[in-house]
Image: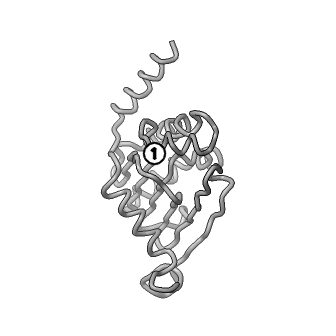
Amino acid sequence: MITQARERIDVLVYAAVFLHEAYPRLNHLLHERAAEGCAVRVAVGDAESENVQARGQEERFGHGIESRCRLALMHYSSLIGTPNIEVRTHGTTLYNSLYRADDQILVNAHVWGVNAYGAPVWHLRRKGSPLLARAVGSATLGSHHGASLEDHVQALDRPRSRRYLATMTDNRKGNAA
């Protein structure tokens, strides 16, 4: 899906560290897509936010999610400052992790008390119409997910810089001493 994206790639997650574990060349691919004019936006959870910490309590995994958010941000750190790539954090409640590439979106439905990897994933595609998938009642399957992604990435997240990442890393080292 990402390898075929030409216009945009959006990732809205708490951490999704599996992406870099499963695809060690993910940053190279995102850099390549951006160099060819594709807009890439990545928003990971802010480990210090109340919503991320609450999610960790719900998962009953201690501070695991906070550390995964920090690790995810570190994975993307080499992309910070790259033209056509935005790496941000958010402190919002996520009901779904969203992965969009052009006219396709993967929706990982979050389930209370379960890590995202244990929850269902839907693959929605636009097929010959201006809306993703097909109409369901008054909404369109996928349209709300796309709008949710836009709301998070546009309004509720924080751009991150290499300086922020260095500060975060220095603070973590100080806490370990």
Asked which secondary structure carries label 1, the reply is: helix
38 vs 156: above or below: below
Q: Residue at x 45, y 75 (%)?
A: 143
Q: Residue at x 63, y 49 (%)?
A: 113
The x, y position of residue 5, in whole percent, is 49, 66
Q: Residue at x 41, y 51 (%)?
A: 92
Q: Quadrant of residue 3?
A: bottom right
Amino acid under label 1? Asn
The x, y position of residue 151, in whole percent, is 35, 62
Q: Quadrant of residue 33?
A: bottom left
The x, y position of residue 168, in whole percent, is 41, 28
Q: Nearer the viewer, residue 150 or 79?
A: 150
Q: Nearer the viewer, residue 138 or 172?
A: 138
Q: Residue at x 69, y 54 (%)?
A: 118
The x, y position of residue 106, in whole percent, is 56, 65
160 vs 169: above or below: below
152 vs 6: above or below: above
35 vs 103: above or below: above
The N terminus: image quadrant:
bottom right
Q: How is the image coloured?
A: one colour
For disc 1, the neighbor class at 10 Å (few under 14, some 14 to 19, many from 20) is: some
Quick one: which residue is furthest to the right in this view?
A: 118
Q: Nearer the viewer, residue 35 or 166?
A: 166
Would you name the residue on which mark 1 appears? Answer: 51
